[in-house]
Image: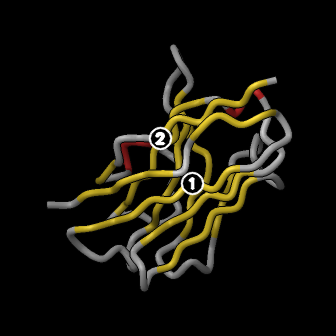
Amino acid sequence: QVQLVESGGGVVQAGGSLILSCAASGRTFSSASMGWFGQAPGKEREFVAVISGSGGSTYYSDSVKGRFTISRDNAKNTMYLQMNSLNAGDTAMYYCAAAAKSNLVTVTWAYDYWGQGTQVTVSS
């Protein structure tokens, strides 16, 4: 059974940093694009960042570009999201996802596997 498990969320003050992790089990994802999505209360799940299977290509939403960094360690089947200069607008449940058939996609329907989410709350 495929599983993605996020961790690293929490409460942080505005201007602070967090590192989210997404551990994959059940199969290797070295050939799959993996992404992060955020969902604030009452809003749709939105694209944050995506990384190619090799880790050589990345793409970010405009709202996080320059502040967040996505990376992966295929030897550990783990993906990361370094979040810097956090602000109240970043408060959301963050989900990791894996796309087995598509590369560097930004839409939710292209992803085949999802984690359960980890909550990030930024206090002002």
Q: Position of residue 9 (x, y in %)?
A: 55, 43
The residue lying at 47 percent from left, 41 percent from top is 118
Secondary structure under the numbered disc 2 in the rendered image: strand
Question: How far, Cα to Cα, is label 1 from label 2?
Answer: 8 Å
Mark on residue 12?
none
Query: Coloured how?
Result: secondary structure
The answer to whether 42 is drawn above or below residue 35 in the figure is: above
The answer to whether 23 is drawn above or below residue 37 in the figure is: below
Between 97 and 59, the residue placed more toward the observer is 97
Q: Earlier in the sequence, mark 1 or mark 2?
A: 1
How many numbered marks have been drawn onto this rendered protein structure?
2
**Residue 85 shown left or right of residue 34 in the figure:** right
Q: Position of residue 28 (x, y in %)?
A: 30, 77
The residue lying at 38 percent from left, 50 percent from top is 110
The answer to whether 59 is drawn above or below residue 41 in the figure is: below
Q: Amino acid at mark 2?
A: Thr
Q: Position of residue 97 (x, y in %)?
A: 40, 53
**Residue 50 shown left or right of residue 102 in the figure:** right
Q: Position of residue 53 (x, y in %)?
A: 47, 76
**Residue 91 shown left or right of residue 62 in the figure:** left
The image quadrant where one finds the N terminus is: bottom left
Between 1 and 58, the residue placed more toward the observer is 1
The residue lying at 35 percent from left, 48 percent from top is 115
Disc 1 crowd, CA 10 A, few/some/many (<14, 14-19, 20+): many
Q: Amino acid at mark 1?
A: Leu
* Most distant residue in the left direction: 1
Residue at label 1? Answer: 20
Q: Are marks 1 and 2 in contact (CB under 8 Å)?
A: yes
Secondary structure under the numbered disc 1 in the rendered image: strand
The residue lying at 51 percent from left, 82 percent from top is 54
Residue at label 2? Answer: 118
